Image (spheres, coloured by chain):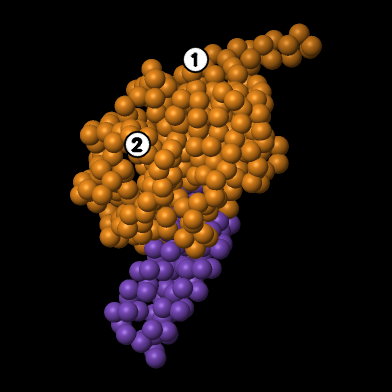
Amino acid sequence: MTRLVRLLAAVALVAATSCGGRSPSLPTLVARFGPIADLGTISGHVVKGDKVILMAGDASLVRIDLQASTHSTMTLPCSTGNRCWGLAGLNDGTLWTLKGMHSVMQLPGEGQALREVPLEAAHLGIHGAGSRLVLQPGTLPAGDPVLYAEAPGAMRHPWSTMRARPFVTLATGAAAALNLVSCGVSRTDELPCWFPDEPALSLISESGATRVVTLEGLPHAAPELLINARVPQRPVRDVFVEADGTIWVISTGTPIGAASEVPGGWLLARYGRRGEPIDRRQLPEPVRIILRAAHGRALVLTGAGMVSEVQP
Amino acid sequence: MVKRMLFTLAILAVVIGVPGTTRASDTCATDLANCYVAAAKIDSFWYRWAAGLDCELQFTNCARIMILGT
């Protein structure tokens, strides 16, 4: 009888490990430094070598030095009713954020002062693509482009092939929220962007050329549930693309143990540059963003605020 | 008066009628309902309509924290 149980266990183990990355493994998460406390919601981040910059809460710009294992926080002139949202890093080294919905703000760098540029309409998203600021309008009629690019202060042009999708059963505000776009970090010349309900990425070059990659094995979120759930199950929470095109994805996944209030996703998945699955890892604790990734290892910011390394 | 009450009832029906058992954006939905009620008190049709659109934008702004923030 014991032999039979062992045999069945061995068969189950072989089956689990031979599924070509379909069965999540449990990796080790090793804390490097932290915690970086009281971050609040992270609305954008930029990675430049060993330096990571986060837009956190209503008005905090957090700079993390991965080499020196240090971090510092600067408070920006934003407020709860006029919060800073998103972060765009351009090739010229400038950093930009949305201040409220009606202006973009260039953040102070070395020898630079804060600069605010008004926008002609309400905007809800900002990203950086090479030398171009990418902005997302607050009003998104179905079929219209969702992203527009410009050099700061110049005329805007539709950017990428991403278009607003119709959600006929939802109110206008909810439909607009589901058409908001997130973008991750890339070491290639393509920026990974995605809609909140879709397990797919649009990889967009600075010129706007777009290729869509479907992320096999991640769930499609029902729009009604996404907009209403207390802890929305998001197929894609953050993305990091390595220099060789390998795509790292944080997905909400399934919490281990009781549902936690700690922010972050529990599943870390890797895909090849054309979306072919490489592996999936169930994390022992939730992680919020990927700070760096290469050769099967990733440095992440955990829900508890630690900078930790995910090891195979 | 009747038109304004109908407007309020219609928009509240939209807000309350969004399916889902656990409301994420409890705060967002409550703010939206309050915003609609305030908008419904505006006499001018066009100003009322514009205020309603602004309520939707404020809801989107609020909801993005839930579904985009990390």
Which residue sits furthest bottom? B1
Instruction: Please give the residue where the numbered disc 1 appears in the rendered image.
Output: A295
Q: At 65% across and 42% down in the image, what residue appears?
A: A37
Whether residue A7 appears in this view of the structure is: yes
Judge from the rendering whether residue A138 lies leftward or rightward of residue A21; answer left or right: left
Which class describes the residues within 10 Å of circle 2: few (<14), some (14-19), or many (20+)?
some
Kindly identify which residue carries mark 2.
Answer: A90
Q: Amino acid at mark 2?
A: Leu
The letter of the purple chain is B
Left-right relation of A248 to A286:
left
Q: Residue B34, position in %: x, y?
A: 50, 74
- Label located before the other in sequence (2 or 1): 2
The residue type indicated by label 1 comes to: His
Q: Is residue B27 left or right of residue A3?
A: left
Which sits in the foreground, A71 or A80? A71
Please state which of residues A48 and A158 is positioned toward the viewer in this rendering.
A48
Q: Above or below — where is A307 with respect to A128?
A: above
Q: Secondary structure at mark 2?
A: loop
